[in-house]
Image: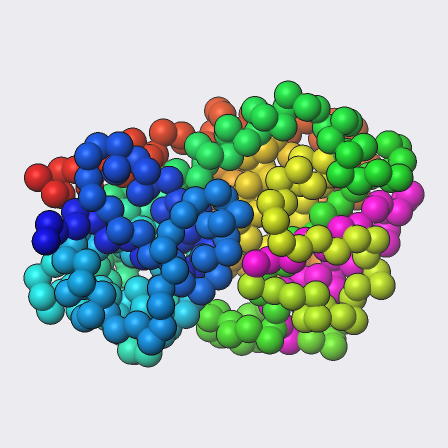
Amino acid sequence: MQNTDVLIFAEDPGAANYLAQLPAALAGRGRLVKALADGHARQHLLQLGVYFEVVQHPAAADQILASVRPRVLIVGTGENPNTLGLALVAEARSVKIGSIGVVDALANPDHRFRGQNAEPLAYAPDWLLVADETTKAAYVALGYPAKQAVVCGHPHYDYMRTVRMKLENEGQNALRQRVLPGVPKSRKVVVFATEGSEKLPQPQSGGLAEYTLTGRGTSNGRTEIVLEEFLDAVQLVRPRPYLVLRLHPKDTSEYYTKYLDEFDLVSSGGSPFELIYAADLIVGLTTMLVLEAALLGKLTLSVVPRAVEMDWLPSVRAGITPCAATRKQLRAALVDLLCDSSHMQCANVDDVIPFGSLQKIVDFIERFLE
């Protein structure tokens, strides 16, 4: 039996974005690739039109590695401390198989490779491929070797650029008539993107004492608090915008039952990009959808409940997504973005976001294998 060159594993939708194009790119170099998906990544990859084999449970890391016999293991990160990805890294270490972790976002670096261990790098792989220098610095600060953390950009940025060009061909007005029929052209459309309800595990440390937003005092979930602040702040905008709640792949509408009457539309499942391109403003916390909207050339606003989170989103760090961490900042930003016509054109993302990362990643893996 011939050994597999590369075993790829994804569980989280963010990791799936980073890894989606990698199997085909490596296969194009003549490499034998096995791509596995678990958790929310399974459906997300299907929405992207990418095939990963679904992990069959119960799944044991040692049995998978013994069966696949990869020369290198590549895993995405996520928030699940019991993910199969960390077990695969630990098993790869014990049987002397090289491992590479891809980090799609800056958020919660001390939780990505912790598992149930107190040590934040307990399950860290041999190498890290990260999206930017800020993310690299966060892992180096935790004690990860700087020479083994490689800045490669993010392949999903390149994918979003191709999506943007397709949507531009149809145009926002035509797309809006098709996606949001009946909404007057003169009425602004605002999408709020959720990021995991309080009913899901919250990896952030420090608790509510660190929060600079309080919401309506009825919830202690990170997303719910920001959502409540948004719903109150948007009441200051006249005329009232058409409000869309876009659910994160990890969320269901039942999580937000008490807020649904305050929205005109709830969107879930399938690709969100046509809806995003048809809208006038996309608001969220630090979800990938806010960055994706910025990559589509849309106006965006990040709202975070703690000041420490203000640099988590790459488009905020690049200066193309404003960020609010207080009620005053949020209310001023919403009025400014929706009522000031000078904001109708977003900054040119091609000037500030690096592209071409997939080639860098494939070249790195090729060198690793050789």
Q: Is residue 337 magenta?
A: no
The answer to whether residue 110 is seen in the rendering is no
Residue 233 relative to residue 270: left or right:
right
The answer to whether residue 84 is seen in the rendering is yes
Give the percent coordinates (x, y) of residue 268. Answer: 66, 55
Q: Is residue 243 magenta?
A: yes
Q: Quadrant of the C terminus?
A: top left
Residue 178 vs residue 159, the one in the foreground: 178
Q: Residue at x 51, y 72 (%)?
A: 202
Residue 213 relative to residue 17: left or right:
right
Give the percent coordinates (x, y) of residue 236. Answer: 86, 51
Q: Quadrant of residue 291?
A: top right
Residue 143 relative to residue 248: left or right:
left
Q: The magenta stretch spans which residues?
A: 220-249
Q: Quadrant of residue 140?
A: bottom left
Residue 59 vs residue 331, the one in the foreground: 59
Give the percent coordinates (x, y) of residue 74. Answer: 25, 53
Residue 195 relative to residue 217: left or right:
left
Q: Residue at x 31, y 52 (%)?
A: 35
Residue 352, above or below 329: above
Residue 87 vs residue 220, the one in the foreground: 87
The furthest residue to the top? 169
Residue 111, above or below 74: below
Q: Residue at x 30, y 64 (%)?
A: 85
Give the percent coordinates (x, y) of residue 65. Answer: 18, 63
Figure disc tally: 0
